[in-house]
Amino acid sequence: MKFRPSIAISLVTLTAGFVAGALFFSSSLVGSSVQAKSFDADTADKIYQELGAKNSPLVHSSNQLAKIAELTTPSVVHIQSERENNTGGTIEETGSGIIIKQENNSGTFVVTNRHVVIGSSENLSSISIHLEDGRVLHPQRLWTDQATDIAIMKVSGKNLPTARWGNSDKLKIGHMVLAMGSPFGFSRSVTLGIISAKGRRSLKLYRNSSVLNQDFLQTDAAINPGNSGGPLIDLHGQVIGINTAIASNSGGNDGIGFSIPSNMVKQIVSKLLKNGSVQRAYLGVKLDPDFDEETAGRLKLDRLRGARVTEVYPNTPASRVNLKFDDVILSFDGIDVQDENHLINLVSLTDVDNKVRLSIQRNGKRLAVEVVLAERPSSNTRSEAPPSLPEKSQTFPTGLSVVTLDGEIQSQLGITGQAHGLLVTKIDPASSLVGKIKLYDVILEVGRQPVKSLGDFQQALKKHATNSTLVLKISRVSADQMHSQLIIWNR
């Protein structure tokens, strides 16, 4: 089972009037009777000399961090944008950004988060970019990508200081980083931390659930409202991330921040400047968001890994190479697939028309498939696209209406422990299952094939479409307890 944290994930732009910053000073230590060890004058002088020595590791490290901050701060900007609300009033958004040069493109650009500026995209003069030296610029052009929450603005000015991109793929957990930007409007702020984790996906971002490509760096460097769009800097003084969100119960920093890796940002920026938008490739499959150890074992995998296919859509790259239900995609173009969201990133950020090699497991055997990716139609929200909406009750040719069993429904039925299946919510009087299936029954298997979702149920029925008799395993409430039994369905 996958662990999905329930803590709120918030984008870190600050809306003016929404947060009022307050500074608190503690006087609890004034007049404190805490006793400290005292030194004589000569000993104290010696200790001070040791602490201030140039070869002191602490002093050296501190000086290095100061140099990095001094080098990078001039390229960090404070962004203010204004837009009208529904009542005709004005809403001000504030955030951060970083000035960069982009390879193979003339001019100078500011990279930030889309949610910092999107409300003002139709009026670029309402976007103000504040530089460290006091200058205020307005963007000449603006490009945005909703699926990654990235925006890039072209700016013009003399002697604009630019930052350098770093390679986020080389980051390791534990590497030290600096988060820079304008938290709570305090521009030119710098905080220190480490890379706490990599590859954070499936975050439910407050106010922006449309972020498809998630592969965040996690850091404990303090990130707060207003840091959105600001850079995450490594110890080489290079940009290795764009700060985007925080996990917080309080609305402020709780020690968990998220940044878009620089390599993803560079790729998106390059495509935006080249094409004006980002073309996204797709396979044309539906993936299992609840792929777990039990299902992996049934599919003869040695451990839980990869992305399980639950449906293949017609006239797509996947259908043309004959991908099938229950195939598990283990690698994509030589990269091991960790889960369904990892595959979504790999596919959608690959160039359209590229031929890639898939390694899949089918019926316990490893297969290699080459597939040419196609561009996903803008109207297509299926395939390996954003996580699907909660499944609703649906009627199949069985004459049954069923809904996926979840924890809330499970508790109301009195089912204890982990369970899965489809709850029967309605039976058509004309169904051949009348008298065999009852309301509140939970369908567990179809033809010995476990069903955990509507897609599983549909695929199992398709698989046995030519069978006149089908065995269903169900769970039924009897004497306030759930009992499993088999149903023989003569279709």
Image: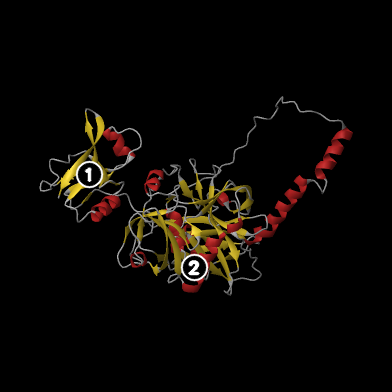
Q: Could you tell me which residue is drawn at 63 percent across and 49 percent down?
A: 191
Q: Is residue 26 visible?
A: yes
**Whole-number angstrom distance, CA of label 2 to CA of label 1:** 57 Å
Which residue is found at the position 65% from the left and 32% from the top?
Answer: 27
Q: Which residue is mark 1?
A: 472
Residue 119 x, y percent position in the rendering: 44, 60
106 with respect to 19 (left or right): right
The N terminus: image quadrant: top left
Q: Where is residue 468 drawn, in percent x and y?
A: 16, 52
Which amino acid, mark 1? Leu
Residue 34, image x and y in percent?
A: 72, 26
Residue for badge 2? 142
SS category of the residue bearing label 2: strand
Residue extending farthest to the left is 430
232 sits to left or right of 433: right
Closer to viewer: mark 2 or mark 1: 1
Q: Residue furthest top?
A: 33
- Number of numbered tags placed on the structure image: 2
Q: Answer few, some or many: residues within 10 Å of disc 2's Cα (few below 14, many 20 plus, some between 14 and 19).
A: many
Evaluate if marks 2 and 1 touch, with contact meaning CB atoms under 8 Å apart: no
In the structure shown, which secondary structural element does the residue marked by tag 1 occupy?
Answer: strand
Q: Give the x, y percent position of residue 185.
A: 56, 52
Q: Residue at x 50, y 67 (%)?
A: 125
Q: Label 1 crowding class (10 Å Cα cut-off): few <14, some 14-19, many 20+? A: some
Q: Is residue 211 visible?
A: no
